[in-house]
Amino acid sequence: MEDKEKGKYNSCIQDETKVLIELFVEEIKRGWRDFSGIINKATVENKILQVLNERVGCQKLQKHYQSRIKFLKNLYNSYVDLQRNSSGFG
């Protein structure tokens, strides 16, 4: 029984992450970043999280968003490092 609940939880996280990335890309395309390239807290709370919560049916807060963005940045940086140092892969 625990496996089913865990699988459902992982599925929710994946769905939330997919929607979050889509929303993040949309916001960047619309130019809603400041001069340093960062989307400010008000934009995140009023535009990204509002739509994310509606589409996925959850109640994510700014701290959840920051945690997920930090995770995605680390994942991306690991991918970039792998690509840079991939000379051993054939």
Image (tube, rainbow, N blue to C red):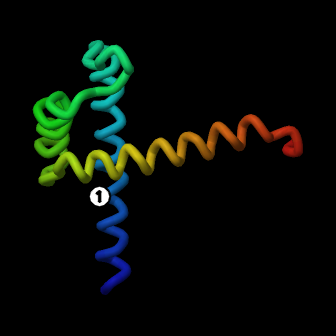
Secondary element type, mark 1: helix
Residue beneath the point at 69% across and 41% down: 81
Would you identify the image quadrant in which residue 84 lies? top right
Circle 1 packing at 10 Å, graded few (<14), some (14-19), many (20+), is some
Q: Is residue 9 above or below residue 59?
A: below
Judge from the rendering whether residue 76 lies leftward or rightward of residue 23; answer left or right: right
Q: What residue type is labelled 1?
A: Cys
Where does residue 27 sit, x and y in percent of width and height? 28, 22
Residue at image position (30%, 39%) is 20
Q: Residue at 17% of width from left, 50% of height from top? A: 61
Compare residues 37 and 84 and report the one nearer the observer.
37
51 in relation to 27, above or below = below
Q: Is 88 displayed left or right of 61 in the figure? A: right
**Would you name the residue on which mark 1 appears?**
12
Residue farthest to the bottom, as pictured? 1
The x and y percentages for residue 28 are 33, 20
